[in-house]
Image (cartoon, coloured by chain):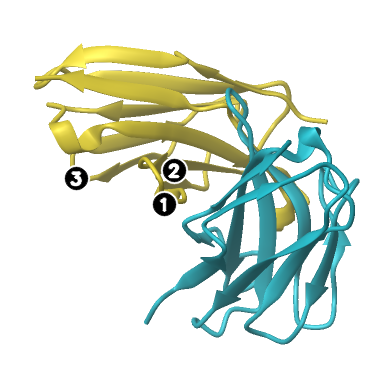
Chain colours: A yellow, B cyan
């Protein structure tokens, strides 16, 4: 099956710093999704990307669909304490359905005040 | 409007015991999903139901059965629990199988001794 490599595994940053994380795939995806999971909760969708090269923002979050369609990036600007959590990327292949989603292993974001 | 609810929140089982995890959604969604989440792993799809009356295997179905009881409810059954099934289980729903937004429940934490 498809492999998704998400990096870094964890990040320890100071409040106010910018954050970058990425996912790379062994195969082409038609959709890239970024989720956030807070402790004790289920994941929540942050951003969805549908086209190669697409750049989409949601507040301080910006995500990009890589030109090769095999990677995606998420940036968080001016981090704040409530950004703490696990960020997951997920890709959907040409099968289309949500049953075709492949998830990355997550990036743990820890913010030191 | 509760979204996706799961019961129980926590469960401890002995090897060989059976149990059913319950999931319900009140968003009139057609598609529902069961995932498991293990440390250092992304979410892995166990089973899904694209619409009422249908169920299909996901990536890791062995040891599980599901029932789409009606449009609202989708249960996951472990007939004979094994320590390898210790995990956090998430139920999710979406408008249909092509919808990119899946709404997740808060999870059930299962420990099998």
Query: In the image, are marks 1 and 2 on the same chain?
Result: yes
- In which quadrant is the N terminus of chain B drawn? bottom left
> As displayed, is residue B49 above or below residue A105?
below
Q: Earlier in the sequence, mark 3 or mark 1?
A: 1
Q: Residues under labels 1 and 2: Cα distance?
A: 5 Å
Circle nearer the viewer, 3 or 2: 2
Callout 3 secondary element: loop
Q: Secondary structure at mark 1?
A: strand
Residue at the image point whose x is 41% and y is 42% from the top: A37
Contact? badges 1 and 2 (CB < 8 Å):
yes
**Numbered disc 2: what chain?**
A
Residue denoted by label 3: A59
In the picture of the structure, the residue carrying the numbered disc 2 is A35
Q: Position of residue B85 (x, y in %)?
A: 76, 40
Residue placed under numbered mark 1 in the picture: A44
Q: Position of residue A66 (x, y in %)?
A: 50, 27
Question: Can residue B27 be seen?
Answer: yes
**In terms of depth relative to the viewer, which is nearer, A61 or A29?**
A61
Q: Give the letter of the chain under mark 1.
A: A
Labelled pair 3, 2 in contact (Cβ < 8 Å): no
* Structural crowding at the residue carrying mark 3, measured as other residues with C-alpha within 10 Å and reported as few (<14), some (14–19) or many (≥20): few
- Residue B24 in the image, given as x and y percentages of width and height: 58, 76
In the image, is B75 to the left or to the right of B38? Answer: right
Rounded to the nearest angstrom, the CA distance separating label 3 from label 2 is: 14 Å
């Amino acid at each position: 099956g498809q492999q998704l490599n998400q990096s870094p595994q964890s990040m320890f940053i100071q409040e106010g710093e910018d954050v970058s994380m990425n996912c790379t795939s062994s195969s082409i995806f038609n959709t890239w999704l970024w989720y956030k999971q807070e402790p004790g909760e289920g994941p929540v969708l942050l951003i969805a990307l549908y086209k190669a090269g697409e750049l989409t923002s949601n507040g301080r979050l910006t995500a990009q669909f890589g030109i090769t369609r095999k990677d995606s990036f998420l940036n968080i600007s001016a981090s704040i304490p409530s950004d703490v959590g696990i960020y997951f990327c997920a890709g959907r292949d040409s099968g289309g359905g949500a049953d075709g989603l492949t998830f990355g292993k997550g990036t743990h974001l820890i913010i030191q005040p | 409007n509760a979204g996706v609810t799961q019961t129980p929140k926590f469960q401890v089982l002995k090897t060989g015991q059976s149990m059913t995890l319950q999931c319900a959604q009140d968003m009139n969604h057609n598609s529902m999903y069961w995932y498991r989440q293990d440390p250092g792993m992304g979410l892995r799809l166990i089973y899904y139901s694209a619409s009422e009356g249908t169920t299909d295997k996901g990536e890791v179905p062995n040891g599980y059965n599901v029932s789409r009881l009606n449009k609202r409810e989708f249960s996951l059954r472990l007939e004979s629990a094994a320590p390898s099934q210790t995990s956090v289980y998430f139920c999710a729903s979406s408008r249909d199988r092509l919808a990119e937004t899946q709404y997740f429940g808060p999870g059930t934490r299962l420990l099998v001794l």
